[in-house]
Amino acid sequence: KQRVLSGIQPSGKLTLGNYIGAMKNFVALQHEHDCFFMVVDLHAITVPQEPAALREQSEAVAALFVAAGLDPAQASIFMQSHVPAHAELGWLLTTMTYMGELERMTQFKDKSEGKDAVGAGLFVYPSLMAADILLYNSNLVPVGDDQKQHLELTRDLAGRFNYRYGETFVIPEPFIPKVGARIMSLDDGTKKMSKSSPNVGSFIALLDSPDEIRKKISRAKTDLGREIIYDVQNKPEVSNLMTIFAQCSGQTLEQVQTTYDGQGYGAFKKDLAEVVVQALEPLQNKYADIRSSGEIHHILREGAERASTVAEITLREVKEAMGFLPRA
Ligand code: AQP
């Protein structure tokens, strides 16, 4: 069985982008593969987080994993901070990462732009992400398009380590969806939908109420003209809404385009809102059940135990290969 690992930051309310770009694939992969999915709280603190909000969002993301269809019997679901090996390997790999490599990361450039106080954690984030992946000897990493560059760096670091210290790490492959790898913001078709955006109208949160979803979609920016045509270059906003439609309804982009041929934005947006509401309804119901039962704590404990067992073996091998004196 191939090993699969991925994570989501509890840095806000999960969006339709997180779901379409990443979580949908987590669910699809769990039956055929040996899967580890984590809530990456150590990554979330690379930008300031309020403690009570971090705690609540962490539990919410874990519960959303299960609500979206992950089965804790099939996949290990855990908090990154519950497995200390992540922070430790993160440091070891940070020492092997070049400043120039980190300076090239577009996510760092985007997130630090215009800020006068930028935490060093935001800069070295990709080294910790590499540790997350390499600790489990992961073969496949299901992520959205924005994480491709970080994954390239992970592959480079794994290769560098293997070259310096002998074969230790598996070189992982990204697993990126063909449609929906980059869901764009509702207020700007050139920016990705992001859970930490200060404009709540720019994203659809998985837990938004039906009325909030309808309102956000009706206000979503649309391109000039009135045709429903998939054309990312010339009609980025409409193309993004079509992608969301296709992903939430199970239709292809061609089918969506044919259905709305000759119709205006109004009718399309109205139907899109209903498609999104319906796609999220089962997830929202299941989420409410999971949160009220409190079972997530048990799921996270079991997940952390399974994850630790694997992670500690890798960490021991790494330290031995690097020349650390073993503890007697
Ligand atoms: N807009 C998106 N379209 C498709 N996939 C996306 N992902 C994120 N945004 C989109 C994918 O979701 C997974 C989890 O993302 P993350 O929590 O690691 O953070 P991120 O990539 O930085 O995403 P956000 O939502 O924009 O979070 P913030 O605002 O906190 O930075 C990843 O697989 C990501 O590719």
Image (cartoon, helix red, strand yellow):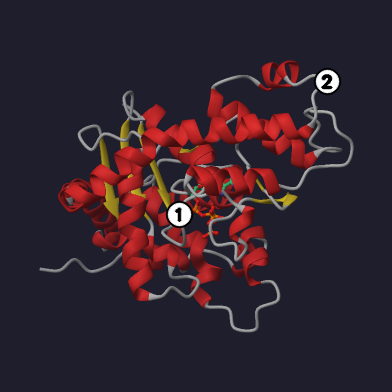
Position of residue 149 measured from the top left corner of the image (x, y, whole percent): 61, 50
Q: Amino acid at mark 2?
A: Gly
- Is 131 above or below relative to 170? below
Q: Is residue 32 left or right of residue 302?
A: right
Give the residue drawn at x 31%, y 66%.
Answer: 55
Q: Quadrant of the N terminus?
A: top left
Tell me which label, 1 or 2, sits earlier in the chain. 1
- Most extreme residue toward the right, as rendered? 225
Give the residue drawn at x 18%, y 53%.
Answer: 297
SS at circle 1:
helix
Judging depth in this view, the residue of 215 and 72 nearest the camera is 215
Position of residue 216 measured from the top left corner of the image (x, y, whole percent): 62, 48
In whole angstroms, how far apart are the C-alphas of marks 1 and 2?
Answer: 48 Å
Q: Which mark is residue 262?
A: 2
Counting labels gives 2
- Is 99 above or below relative to 300? below
For residue 139, which quarter of the picture? top left
Q: Are marks 1 and 2 in contact (CB under 8 Å)?
A: no
In the rendered image, which residue does mark 1 sit on?
Answer: 130
Give the residue drawn at x 33%, y 28%.
Answer: 33
Q: Amino acid at mark 1?
A: Ala
Label 1 beta carbon less than 8 Å to ligand 1: no
For residue 56, which quarter of the picture? bottom left
Q: Neighbour class for label 1 at 10 Å: few (<14), some, many (≥20)? A: many
- Is 259 above or below relative to 99? above
Q: Quadrant of the C terminus?
A: bottom left
Q: Neighbour class for label 2 at 10 Å: few (<14), some, many (≥20)? A: few
SS at circle 2:
loop
Q: Which mark is residue 165?
A: none
Label 2 beta carbon less than 8 Å to ligand 1: no
